[in-house]
Each structure stands twice: as C-alpha cells, then as structure tokens.
Image (cartoon, rainbow, N blue to C red):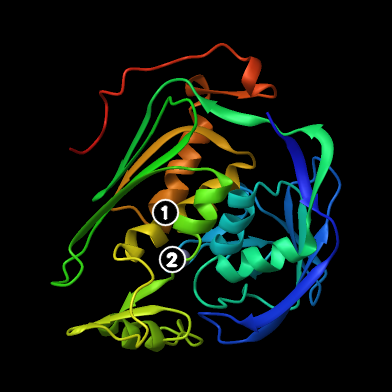
Amino acid sequence: MRLQRTIKQAVSFEGIGLHTGNRVIVKLKPAPRDTGIVFYRNDKNVIIRANIASVTDTAFATSLGSNGTRIKTVEHILAALSGLGIDNLIIEINGSEIPILDGSSTELIDIILKGGIAKQGKKQPYMRIIKPVIFEDGHAEIAALPYEGRKLTYRIQFNHHLLGEQQLSIDLNEENFIKEVAPARTFGFLKDVEYLRANGLAKGGSLDNAVILGEDGVMNKSGLRFKDEFVRHKILDFIGDISLIGCPVFGHIVANKAGHSSNIKFTKKLLASTDCWEIISDFEQAPRFVYPQKTLIFQ
Ligand SMILES: [Zn+2]
C-alpha cells in the first residue's frame, strides 16, 4: 500500500497540440492530498477535473471539459501520471490542448521527475476488481477480471499489410511503465492524414510526434522504438483513459480492438458495476482473492 503522491516543486514546459497545432505553456504544480488530478485553463479561469464525468469527446483523442471550456488530448499526460503514481496535481494550461511533444509519454515523465516526487503521508485508495466486468461495443471488447496486481493485455488488429495484429500482456509497475509503455508513440496511417486535416484535426501532427504508416512502411526515418510500438501505444492510451476513474485499478484488463471511445464507455460501465469492485485503502492487509482466469474474451 503506497502513500499518495504529488510533485515536490512546480515545473513547466511548452509545445504544440497534435490536433490544434497551437503552442501552449503548461505548468505542473503540487496539489494537497485527496485533490486528484485537476486541469486549470488559466486563459479562461476554468477548472476541469480529471474524472470520467468531464469527458466531452473521444474522437482521435480524449477531451475533457467544463461549461463549454475544453482540454484536448489529455491521455498521454494522464498515463504518465498514472504510471508514475502521481495522484494529486494541478495542470495549468493557457490553451485548449496538451502539447504532443514526441507523441509518447517519455518527455512528460522526464518533466514530472524534474519536479521530484513527494509522498503525502496518507494512503492512496485503490479500486480492486472482485468480479468480471465484460464490455462489448461493435468490434471492441474490454473486460476487467480479478487479479492480484495491475495487468493489461491488449490486442489490436488493423487492415494494413504491415501492421495486422499485435498483442501484448504486461504487469504494470513504475519501472516497466517507464521502459516498456511510455516511449511508444502516437501512430496514424498516411491515408487518414488528409481526412484528419480536412476535419480540422492533426494540424500539429508530423513525423516528429507520430509514427506514420504509409503503403511502403513506417515513414519515420528513425524507424520504430519497439517492433510492437503500436500496441504499446494503445496500452499507453488505455492507462490514461482508465485513470479517469480517479484511483489505480487492481485487476487484469483485457482489451481487444479498443480505442478512446470504447475505453471511456468501458470505464463508465466499470464504475457503474458497483458489485464487481471494492475500494480499499489498505491493499496489503485485504484478504487475498484469486478468480479462475477462464473468461478471457479472446483466444
Ligand atoms: Zn495516444
């Protein structure tokens, strides 16, 4: 059982948004215990809490909002905070989209760690899955299963001759989040870029912040960071999206062909399935519970 955490001192960074293309400045500031993650649009004087009720849009990124003021593309910074176990933080921003930086969470992690991690003398509650929650939405399937730890199994499948299917199962902790998940970059298909641009999206997108797959392969000169960078990035997105529950989830999440929209719908279903989880504030002392893992939703 760990203590709640924030950062020791404020840090700031700037960059452009993937979709808006706008340059913004972000300040990360320590927050008192039990605050949670809070966005503050200082250009509009609006507070937006990082919780599932704040989600306004899930097309190509996860957006949060409050009374018409929005923040787009919150998933990579939320994933970085969840992966590092930062529970309380103010994210102050002077625009409508979190900078994409290199398209992964690695630079965000470096920035957060520059602020230092501060323990806050109070235990962080966890959500612990005690019964399976199964969710289906079109092609997407996501399940939460009881498991003694934080495990994610993710499978993607695309109709692209170079991508096809990738699957990865990972037991999450701070170290392997930083090494195995955080460096995986946003990706897209060249054939979709024109569509996105025509719809006012991906204005800040480039080979510096996204892996682009063309007909002949990966267009980025430096190639891939992992052979299965694509599924790793989907895991990164999922970690960011599910963090909108507001506390870490102990269980095994199995996802198949999911994306932001299904991640958020699943998270809502999970929260509503109150007989399938419990909130515990002293995990190590809770009775151990092992559920037979026979309900995997894909083979
Ligand atoms: Zn992403």
> Could you tell me which residue is drawn at 71 percent across and 63 percent down?
112
* Residue at screen point 62% across, 72% down: 98
Foreground: disc 2 or disc 1? 2
Q: SS at mark 1? A: helix
Of residues 206 and 267, which is closer to you in this image? 206
- Please provide percent x and percent y for residue 225: 39, 70
Return the residue nearer the eye: 175 or 6: 175
**Residue 75, labelled with which disc?**
none
Residue 146 x/y as whole percent: 43, 24
- Residue 35 falls in which quadrant of the image? top right
Residue type for callout 2 = Ala
Mark 2 or 1 closer to N-term? 2
Give the image location of residue 152, x and y in percent: 40, 42
Q: Amino acid at mark 1?
A: Ile
Q: Which residue is mark 2?
A: 184
Asked whether mark 2 lies closer than 8 Å to ligand 1, one says no
Q: Which residue is mark 1?
A: 235
Residue located 43% across and 57% down the image: 260
Mark 2, secondary structure of its residue: loop
Residue 217 on image: x %, y %: 21, 81
**Badge 1 local density, few (<14 within 10 Å), some, or many (20+)?**
many
Q: Quadrant of the N terminus?
A: top right
Q: Is residue 72 visible?
A: no
Q: Is residue 65 left or right of residue 58?
A: right
Residues marked 2 and 1 touching at CB (< 8 Å)? yes
